[in-house]
């Protein structure tokens, strides 16, 4: 098994990515390595013995905001796998956590698996497809080295969590709720690219504060947490075989 030499990090929001790009000393790739009209931005450079690409989904045309959600994430992940050909893809970002699962603001999680909580298709066969299940790349040594929490990451295209989603999240045994990872996992499975996810908690889904308020309040701090967490992951995985993670 070949060592990990090319690492791509996919992040939805530029505010989440900016501290990491600065910390790693990466430069914007111009022209973009991605053909066509996709708005994703790529920042690249050498980090130790590895080549690292940090990729943001870019700005949503006509709206002036970050392209969040599963569709932009899957499009960006496809371009990454097709054109950057990483040995390992890391989805980094902010997310919601759960008191019931021991989560707290500022916690950092490493995904164990990826599921969906808002794809409800009550038809035999399609029901399992809707929820989905993709395993993250096994990384017991990485978890031990970093102390990050393990947990299932559940994906939906809404920031809030109505009762029907909460029920699905419980069935998924989710520790992390976010808006991109399952879409990225779908693409990684197509390309047979191993996927890790590093998620910093900004809000508590089963807490007392409105999600949007708590998210905005803690976004900066969570981005700083990613700035510290993701380099630790990159440093650990670079040059190792996947079986040693």
Image (cartoon, rainbow, N blue to C red):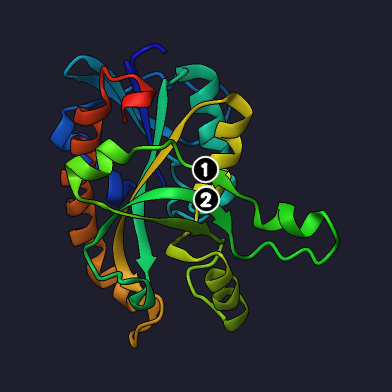
- The residue indicated by pointer 1 is 135
Of all residues, the one furthest to the right in this rendering is 123
Mark on residue 105?
Answer: none
In the image, which is nearer the foreground, mark 1 or mark 2? 1
Which of the two residues, 16 or 140, is positioned nearer the viewer here? Answer: 140
Residue lying at 78% horizontally and 63% vertically, measured from the top left:
121
Up/down of 66 relative to 209, above or below = above
- The answer to whether the residue labelled 1 contacts the one labelled 2, judged by CB atoms less than 8 Å apart, is yes
Q: Looking at the rendering, in which quadrant would you find the C terminus? A: top left
For label 2, the SS is strand
- Residue 95 visible, this angle: yes
According to the image, label 2 marks what residue? 114
Left or right: residue 96 compared with residue 75: left
Residue at 63% x, 65% y: name it: 118
Q: CA distance from mark 1 to mark 2?
A: 6 Å
**Does residue 90 appear left or right of residue 133 in this picture?**
left
């Amino acid at each position: 098994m070949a060592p990990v030499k090319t690492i791509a990090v996919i992040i939805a929001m530029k505010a989440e990515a900016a501290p990491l790009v600065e910390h790693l000393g990466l430069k914007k790739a111009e022209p973009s390595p991605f053909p066509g009209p996709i708005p994703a931005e790529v920042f690249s450079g050498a980090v130790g013995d590895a080549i690292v690409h940090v990729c943001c989904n870019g700005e949503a045309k006509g709206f002036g905001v970050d392209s969040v959600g599963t569709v932009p994430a899957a499009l960006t992940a496809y371009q990454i796998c097709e054109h950057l050909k990483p040995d390992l893809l890391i989805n980094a970002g902010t997310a919601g956590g759960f008191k019931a699962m021991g989560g707290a603001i500022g916690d950092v999680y490493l995904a164990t698996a990826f599921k969906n909580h808002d794809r409800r298709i009550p038809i035999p066969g399609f029901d399992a497809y809707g929820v989905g299940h993709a395993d993250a790349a096994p990384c017991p040594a990485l978890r031990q080295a970093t102390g990050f929490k393990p947990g299932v990451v559940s994906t939906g295209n809404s920031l809030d969590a109505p009762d029907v989603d909460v029920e699905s999240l419980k069935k998924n045994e989710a520790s992390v709720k976010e808006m991109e990872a399952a879409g990225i996992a779908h693409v990684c499975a197509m390309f047979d690219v191993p996927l890790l996810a590093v998620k910093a908690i900004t809000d508590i889904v089963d807490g007392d504060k409105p999600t949007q308020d708590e998210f905005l309040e803690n976004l900066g701090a969570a981005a700083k947490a990613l700035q510290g967490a993701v380099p630790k992951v990159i440093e650990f995985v670079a040059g190792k075989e996947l079986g040693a993670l």
